Structure formats: C-alpha cells, structure tokens
Amino acid sequence: MQSNQNRIIKAIAVDLQTAKALSLANPHVLRALCKEPEKKQQEMANGEEYVLMDYTHLVGELEIHYVGYLLTSALGREDGPLASFYNSCKVADLNVDENRFGPIIDIIGKVYG
C-alpha cells in the first residue's frame, strides 16, 4: 500500500501557442492565471497529503516557458537551430519535480509573483 506522502500531482499543461497566451506578458495576468491551478490542485488533493506546486513555482516555471517560447518563436521555431527548445516551450508542462532550472524557478517566481 502506497502512503499519501508519495502522491504527486505531476503536471499542469498551458498551451502558449494561443492568442490568449500573449496576455501573459502582463504580470497581473500571469499572477491571476497561476492562482487558478494552485486552487485546482488543492481541490484535486481533496484534503489528502500530496506534493503540490506552490504559487511561486507555478509563476516561475510558467514565466520561464513563456520567455523561452517568445524567444525561440522569434528565432526560428520548428526549422531553426532552437527547434528542440521551441518544442519544449510551446506547451508549458508545469511539473512539481522540475529540476532543470531548480532555484531559478523560485527566484523568477518570487520576482514575478
């Protein structure tokens, strides 16, 4: 039997290829958007102990994906030298166990959040 301490809500996906995603350039919109998944995670956990993403993590990781998406879409998209980075940024999979950017996620989350 698995204990509740090992339960993780793994990812939340945000498609950055939509026209609405451009509004994430506004920090107020970014903050408001990140409050919703934070609430949704709590609802999904239903009072049980899960490892959840906090607000700062959501803001930081989404902002990294957004900036990466903007830069790579301006510099070549699928056919340029940054195609693999573009493909990893165009849909932001926000993961509680993201470790590629580690403390940078927290720093950006605190600055923007």
Image (cartoon, rainbow, N blue to C red):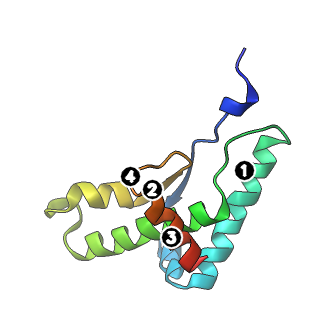
Is there a contact, CB below 8 Å, between mark 4 and mark 2? yes
Residue occupying the far top of the picture: 1
Please identify, in this view, whether the residue under mark 2 or under mark 1 is nearer the observer. 2
Q: Secondary structure at mark 1?
A: helix
Q: Which residue is mark 3?
A: 107
Q: Nearer the viewer, residue 71 or 20?
A: 71
Which badge, 2 or 3, comes first in the chain's sequence? 2
Q: Which residue is mark 1?
A: 41
Please identify, in this view, whether the residue under mark 1 or under mark 4 is nearer the observer. 4
Is there a contact, CB below 8 Å, between mark 2 and mark 1? no
Please identify, in this view, whether the residue under mark 3 or under mark 1 is nearer the observer. 3
Residue type, mark 2 in image: Gly
Q: Nearer the viewer, residue 25 or 106?
A: 106
Question: Quadrant of the rendered structure where residue 1 is?
Answer: top right
Q: Which residue is mark 4?
A: 100
Measured from the top left, where is residue 41 in percent x and y? Answer: 72, 50
Q: Label 4 vs label 2: CA separation?
A: 6 Å
User: Viewed as shown, does residue 62 lie left or right of 76?
Assistant: right
Asked whether residue 56 appears in the rendered view, the answer is yes
* Point 70% across, 20% down: residue: 2
* Residue 90: numbered disc: none
Q: Which residue is mark 2?
A: 102
